[in-house]
Structures are given as C-alpha cells and as structure tokens.
C-alpha cells in the first residue's frame, strides 16, 4: 500500500510537465530527455514495475479527456529505468480519426497489423 502511494505521488509530480511537454515537443527530443531522466531512477522489480504501470493507468484514465497511451508511455519511461531502455513505438492509421493510433513500450507484436505505419524510437 505504501509503495503504491509513493508511485502515485511520483506520477502526479511528473504529470504536469510531461503533459505540457508532449503537447509542445516532438517525440524524439522528448523521449531522449525522458529516457535520461528514467535511467537515473532506482531499478524496480517486476512486481514493482507492474505496480507503477497500474498506478499510471489508474491516474491517466481519470484525467480530463480520458486516458492517453502516449502520455502513459512517457510517464513510464520517465519513472522506470527498464522502461527507459525499451524501444518506443507509435502505430498510426491513415484515417487520422481520433484514437486511430497507439503508443507503447516494449516489442512489436501482432497488433502492428492494425496500423498503416509503425514508428520505432
């Protein structure tokens, strides 16, 4: 319980600057900066990383406008050194409709078939 509270405080502390940055900076310079920040964090166990992901998701889905996968990925990269080392992906559909893309950390999987373009950084 105490660790989840600490994670929530860290997420809430990082959220305003990451929210602003994702709206004014391009993905490449922002990812580079957040990766450097994440690499300075203490390593997490697998359960600790899962707890952080759950905390980010719980906070993110309650924000005005609803959840945002790009924001969640950026928060995780900034707060977890393992996430900071992982490849970052953006899947984009040519329809350009709202919610027609997705951002994630990790590896390419079968879900990339849903996108016209997949960018890896």
Image (spheres, helix red, strand yellow):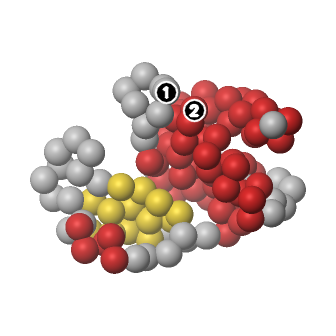
Vertical order, 67 against 114 (above or below): above
Q: Position of residue 30 (x, y in %)?
A: 56, 50
Q: Position of residue 34 (x, y in %)?
A: 66, 51
Q: Is residue 29 visible?
A: no
In-image side of 54 versus 37 (left or right) = left
Neighbor class of circle 1 (other Cα within 10 Å; few <14, some 14-19, many 20+) is few
- Circles 1 and 2: CB atoms closer than 8 Å: yes
Q: Position of residue 121 (x, y in %)?
A: 50, 68
Tag 1, which secondary structure?
Answer: loop
In-front residue for pair 120/61: 61
Residue 62's tag is 1
Q: Measuring 86% from the left and 56% from the top, which residue is drawn there?
A: 42
Residue 11: quarter of image: top right
Vertical order, 110 against 14 (above or below): below
Residue 59's tag is 2
In-image side of 15 versus 117 (left or right) = right
Residue 92: quarter of image: bottom left
Tag 2, which secondary structure?
Answer: helix
Q: Measuring 29% from the left and 54% from the top, which residue is drawn there?
A: 101
In-front residue for pair 60/73: 60
Residue extending furthest toward the top = 64
Residue 80's tag is none
Q: Measuring 62% from the left and 50% from the top, which residue is drawn there?
A: 53
Q: Quadrant of the N terminus?
A: top right
In-front residue for pair 111/97: 111
């Amino acid at each position: 319980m105490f660790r989840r509270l600490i994670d929530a405080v860290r997420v809430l502390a990082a959220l305003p600057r990451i929210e602003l940055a994702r709206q004014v900076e391009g993905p490449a310079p922002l990812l580079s900066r957040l990766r450097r920040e994440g690499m300075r964090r203490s390593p997490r166990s697998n359960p600790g990383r899962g707890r952080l992901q759950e905390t980010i998701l719980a906070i993110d889905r309650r924000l005005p406008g609803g959840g945002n996968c790009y924001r969640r990925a950026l928060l995780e990269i900034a707060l977890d050194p393992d996430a900071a080392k992982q490849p970052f992906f953006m899947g984009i559909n040519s329809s350009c409709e709202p919610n027609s893309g997705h951002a994630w950390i990790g590896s390419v999987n079968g879900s990339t078939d849903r996108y016209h373009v997949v960018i890896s950084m």
